[in-house]
Amino acid sequence: MDDRTAIGWLHRRVGFGLAPGELDQLAALGVDATLDRLLDPGAAGVAAEGSPFDGMAFDPQRRCAAIIEAVGRWLDRMTTTQRPLVEWMAWYWHGHLTTSVASVPFAPLVGDQIDLYRAAGLGDLPSLLRSATVDAAMLLYLDGNTSTGDSPNENYGRELLELFALGVGAFDEADVRAAARALTGWTVARRTGEVRFVAARHDATPQRLLGRDVDDVDSVIAAVVEHPACAPFVAGRLARAILGEVDDGLVASFGRRFADADLQIAPLVRAIVEAGLDGAGTTMFGAPVPWAAGAARATGGRPDRRAVLGLLDGAGQVPLRPPSVAGWPGGGAWLAASTVVGRFNLAFATAFAAPVDGAARTAAARGDVAALADVLGRPEGLSGPTADAVRAAPAGAGRFAGLERLAVALASPDLAVI
Amino acid sequence: MTEPTPSRVDRRRFLLGAGALGLGVGLGGCRPGSDPARAALGAAAVPATSLPAPSAPVAAADPSRRVLVLVQLLGGNDALNTVVPAAGRYHDARPGLGLDDTLVALAGRTDLGLHPSLAPLADRWAAGQLGVVAGLGLPEQSRSHFTAMDTWWSARPGEPPRTGWLGRWLDATADEPGAADAEMRAIALGGGAPALGAEGEPAVAVGQPAGFALGAGRVDIRPDTTDAYRATALGPTRDPRLAAARAAVPHALDAAELLASLASPPSDDDAEQPGPGGDAARLLDLAAGIVAGDLGTRVISVGVGGFDTHAAQADTHAALLADLATGLEGFLARVAGAGRLDDVLVVTTSEFGRRVAENGSAGTDHGTGGLSLVLGTGLRPRQVVGGYDLDRLVDGDLPLTVDTRSLYATALGWLGGPVDGVIEGPIDDLGLLASA
């Protein structure tokens, strides 16, 4: 890939697209410097960004409004962040170490969890897993909160082993029970969301987990991450999320590199992305949320928050509300009829909200498909059918100039595939 | 998973969507499952003496025109407050939530009554068009939504979910007469689409029918724009994902246009309203339109959420059941108007029932034995299969008296089968259907 194409690719796979002008700025830096900047924005001089959920006080009474607010704020952050890979990692962990506001309807608590994933998402896996295990929203979602030595709840223990860290086949039911017992004692105060460890609720008897003795969260996490299945499982899942289909040999090599790097996530991401820049992997079906954030970023169009939420819901993906603890199934699921229609409607709403004198709308109004492709992060150009279709769509006039052509481009299959 | 190519994606079966969204399904925690005691089947039917004779059950002339409408109540519908036992133990366990003098009588029975919101269904019962299956579930019934839904959809307990029971049936009958010409063989509206998940091409899932149109019902999209959008999806490509994304566009737009033409037009009175009633009423109206539209449809799943009533259950449940009753009656009336009442069988289910005792939040927690209401003209009149064995609770939950797979087998048998190769495991003849 040439530099501009590579930079566009990077921002589709581990970012949320590019704003007008960003592609030129980053192309001037070059691919290597761009990748460094993505992986370590602090070292590149990019200002720190706090929590997008700042100021949202925990209020058990104000649930629905708070959820809508939190989702809107996170979408805004994806659209404007100068640290896209860091934010993308928060988004990735949200879909892997999942929690849903459908069961934990306290937006500030789930927001805290997302903040954790932003802060620790490129750090080391053991710390990330440990923090996630005793996170308030997670304790509520997977019942750690009500799990006691007298009556342990196996939900978190099972998902930690099966979905989060090792995968099916690497553990047995006795391991699930052992993890569950060792993790008892953690509570969330319902009125404040504060997490506390209560010794009286904890079973301190040593348990046998994956062949090791464990009796608390630290020993459980140590047993899990030191299991040989952990590095390849976590690395493989992340590799497939970034590269699409990859062969088992490549996954195994990522697993080895991850283990060699003491389970530091940033070097793993670098290895995966560099492999992709070298041609590893395949095209992928883009998920609605990163696509929507990218469309807003590229066009400057920020539709009404409630409308966006409704349209994302129709398209099948709302941040903070994965359909199950297994996250979003992804892949071909994004070709569903309702996703296709939802994507068109989001494209139209975004194009409508985009400033008529912005780069996207003006290129569309002129029928300048090459310039439009650049703005949309596809410097390699749009396909023949899409280019023809964009030019054939109504040009629009006055404050609607470029609206329909831009919508057609945004909704096109070209942009549904990343 | 095999790549969908343009030649395999056709109008009959669309691609599976994330259809289980948007309906507020919570995910509770797992509690250790109980080992259910299987009580004997059957219920005592009180002989009818002074009741109107039920309508004679009718068999549709052509089984290949039969349509199964599966109504999925997502969240775990409280069976005990839907079809209510007149038993002391029920009232002891539910001092706050228990229903008594407001119950609607079921003709010929003194042991069970209907939640008042379901009053319209009492006439269906009297006419022999409503059957009840109680104490329904699968072995090792899980109380986790996640796990329970997987097996509720797959009917293969103990196995990781890959297909839905109806998806397997659709696969098995893909070559039946009429299948090739069907415009819409199967569709899932609202949540619960995985019940139709198949090995080949899964059925279309439209999670939010109200918004399932270009413009989402709020903006008029010009035909030139729609045409241009369709044109982005033209042409061959070597990339299988781009090919699939292109193929998805005309199929999505065709499905949206088709469904838009089938929903009831809003009456002048409710021009301001989004349409008839709540979720159940709206989705069942659309289902009725699909049946009336004679599209070769064999399976419609309607998934309605909100049934996970852990707290303040009384009003919420009453509203949900009222919406359901409106939806069911509206569906049957509209289908009858199209001359197809004898072609439909409606089966309601939920992923589990709820605990017998109310909890400390004026609600109920996840339980085991669930309920199915079955509606149609092909039923043996006034059947109650299984029951509420309140004297033999297991950890405070109703024992399972009917295996869900037997209910599913009944439905598939009514469709003309096959059952073999689709549903495995213990299958009993529930005696719900008139022999046909």
Image: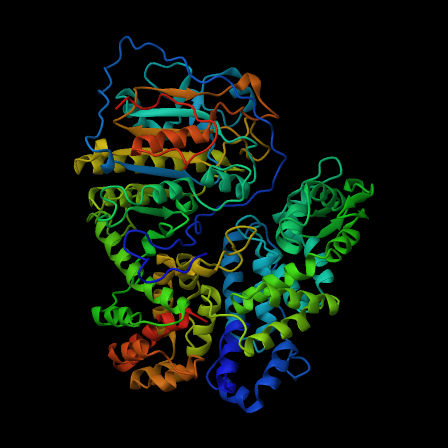
Can you say which quadrant of the picture contains the C terminus of chain B? Answer: top left
Relative side of B76 to A170, left or right: left
Residue A358 appears in the rendering: no
Colouring used for the render: rainbow
Q: Nearer the viewer, residue B310 or A383?
A: A383
Q: Is residue A345 above or below residue B139?
A: below
Q: Is residue B231 above or below residue A24?
A: above
Query: Count of labels shown?
Result: 0
Q: Position of residue A36 (x, y in %)?
A: 64, 81
Q: Nearer the viewer, residue B154 or A21?
A: B154
Q: Position of residue A242 (x, y in %)?
A: 55, 68
Q: Nearer the viewer, residue A337 or A350?
A: A337
Tell me the residue at 61%/48% (across/down): A141
Relative side of A260 to B360, left or right: right
Relative side of A287 to A325, left or right: left
Q: Nearer the viewer, residue B87 or A242?
A: A242
Q: Is residue A78 above or below residue B2?
A: below
Relative side of A375 to A401, left or right: right
Name which quarter of the figure residue B407 lies in: top left
Tell me the residue at 26%/13% (across/down): B51
Q: Position of residue A286 (x, y in %)?
A: 46, 67
Residue A382 appears in the rendering: yes
Q: Residue furthest bottom?
A: A28
Q: Position of residue A219 (x, y in %)?
A: 79, 52
Name which quarter of the figure residue B84 lies in: top left
